[in-house]
Image (spheres, rainbow, N blue to C red):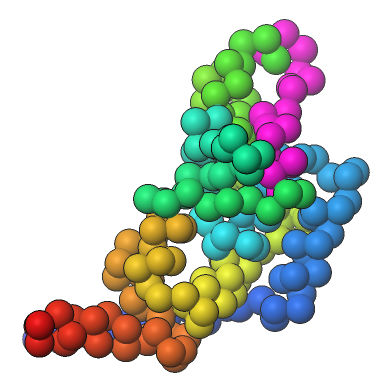
Amino acid sequence: MEIPTRINTEPSQFTPADHRWAQARRLLTEVTLPTGDRVAGLLVLLFAQQVSRIALLTRSHIHHRDDGRTELSLGAANVVLPGPLADLINQLPTPRSDGTARHLHDGTWLFPGRRPGQPLHPTSLSRRLTQLGIVARPDRNSALLDYARQLPPPIIGKLLGLAPGTVDRWATISGGRWARYGNAVSRDSQRT
């Protein structure tokens, strides 16, 4: 009998922080790039979102507050968007220019696909981001690592819509001060 060896599923690809932040600045300021691509790239770089989740965002995920803030629902709690990103996301979906098909789209999807009523396929969105120099996996990994070093896992999960196991794993990978947060909270609650 042969027991298969366990494949290491730890993330191994990361983008250097200075490169990631330079990419984010470029997407915020370079007006010649398509707005949808800029927003999608920023959601990867700043909010560690998977391309497959970005492609499924709709207008109902955007919330406008009385105080002028724009929030985006990525998880159980809304994320307040910084002003420049809020301005960009409020321009979505951008009008289509492909003949009569542009009239068939209802404007529900922030990233509409070629087929009326359908979102852009994640593979297509990923290709567009790659053309801009955004490589989703390492860029997302780096953003998650930064979050895991700075915030407790439950907060990350609520803000970014990540499963508890995922954020606990990232806390452990980061080795930050939150790596043992879940165990400490569990022990404290058992004592009381």
Q: Which residues are magenta?
A: 85-101
Asked whether 169 falls inside the magenta stretch, the response is no
Q: Does the segment drawn in magenta span residue 96? A: yes
Residue 63 seen in this snapshot: yes
Q: Residue at x 37, y 50 (%)?
A: 76
Picture coordinates of residue 72 (x, y %)? 54, 45
Residue 179 at x, y percent in the picture? 37, 87
Please name whichever residue, 150 or 119, is drawn nearer the observer in this view of the structure.
Answer: 150
User: Where is the N terminus found, in terms of image quarters?
Assistant: bottom left
Q: Is residue 163 above or below residue 192?
A: above
In percent of the image, x 74 and y 22: which residue is there? 96
Front residue of this view, candidates 4 and 78: 78
Residue 139, picture quadrant = bottom right
Q: Is residue 15 left or right of residue 11?
A: right
Looking at the image, residue 70 sits to the left or right of residue 34; the answer is: left
Please tell me whether residue 182 is drawn above or below residue 100 in the rendered image.
below
Q: Residue at x 32, y 83 (%)?
A: 181
